[in-house]
Image: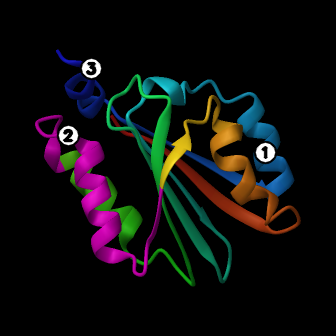
């Protein structure tokens, strides 16, 4: 199987709960190699706020990526839609592309930054977002897609 096809067949979703500081600590021990993924996403929710960051490399080996980001009141149905998409896809199509399509369709306005150096670790990728919520209770989800 090609790397994207293999990863699309077995994507991973990991959930972390606690205040931002506790989740940052959990990311230190989180054994996920984001450098091997072409598309991955981080969602964060509090009682009244939500953020999404979707990272996309054009090729898995690229040293830079595009980052799609959104902030709002709630993720709404997006987590369920992504989960349903993973289940119904069964690894047939690129789940990273399908997830990006859902994010850009359901979250507006979405910001896109291009040519960002690819983060080497989950903490490097998601720590900046978590630092804004150091003392708030959060649910953070890491989606390792393709």
Residues shaded magenta = 88-113
Disc 3 element:
helix
How far across and down, in percent of the image, does residue 127 sit?
A: 73, 48
Looking at this view, name the residue that lies furthest to the front: 115
* Percent coordinates x, y for residue 2 in the rendering: 19, 18
Q: Mark on residue 106?
A: none
Q: Give the labeled residue for mark 2.
A: 94
Earlier in the chain: of badge 3 and badge 2, it is 3
Residue 106 coordinates in the image, percent (x, y): 32, 76
Spatial CA distance of label 1 from label 3 is 29 Å
Asked which secondary structure carries label 1, the reply is helix
Counting residues from the start of the chain, the first of labels 1 and 3 encountered is 3
**Residue 103 in the image: above or below residue 20:** below
Identity of the residue drawn at 71% across and 64% down: 138
**Residue 30 quadrant:** top right
Q: Residues within 10 Å of mark 1 (few under 14, many from 20)?
A: many
For image coordinates 75% across by 38% down, the residue present is: 26
Residue at the spot of label 1: 24
Q: Is residue 13 above or below residue 112?
A: above
Spatial distance from mark 3 to mark 2, Cα to Cα?
10 Å
Q: Quadrant location of residue 43?
A: bottom right
């Amino acid at each position: 199987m090609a790397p994207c096809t293999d990863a699309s067949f077995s994507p991973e979703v990991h959930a972390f709960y606690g205040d931002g500081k506790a989740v940052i600590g959990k990311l230190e021990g989180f054994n996920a190699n984001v450098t091997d993924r072409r598309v991955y996403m981080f969602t964060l929710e509090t009682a009244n706020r939500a953020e999404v960051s979707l990272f996309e490399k054009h090729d898995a080996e690229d040293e830079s990526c595009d980052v799609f980001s959104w902030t709002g009141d709630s993720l709404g149905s997006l987590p369920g839609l992504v989960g349903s998409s993973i289940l119904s896809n069964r690894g047939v199509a690129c789940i990273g592309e399908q997830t990006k399509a859902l994010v850009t369709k359901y979250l507006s306005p979405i910001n896109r930054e291009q040519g960002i150096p690819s983060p080497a670790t989950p903490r490097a990728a998601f720590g900046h977002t978590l630092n804004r919520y150091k003392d708030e209770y959060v649910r953070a989800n890491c989606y390792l897609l393709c």
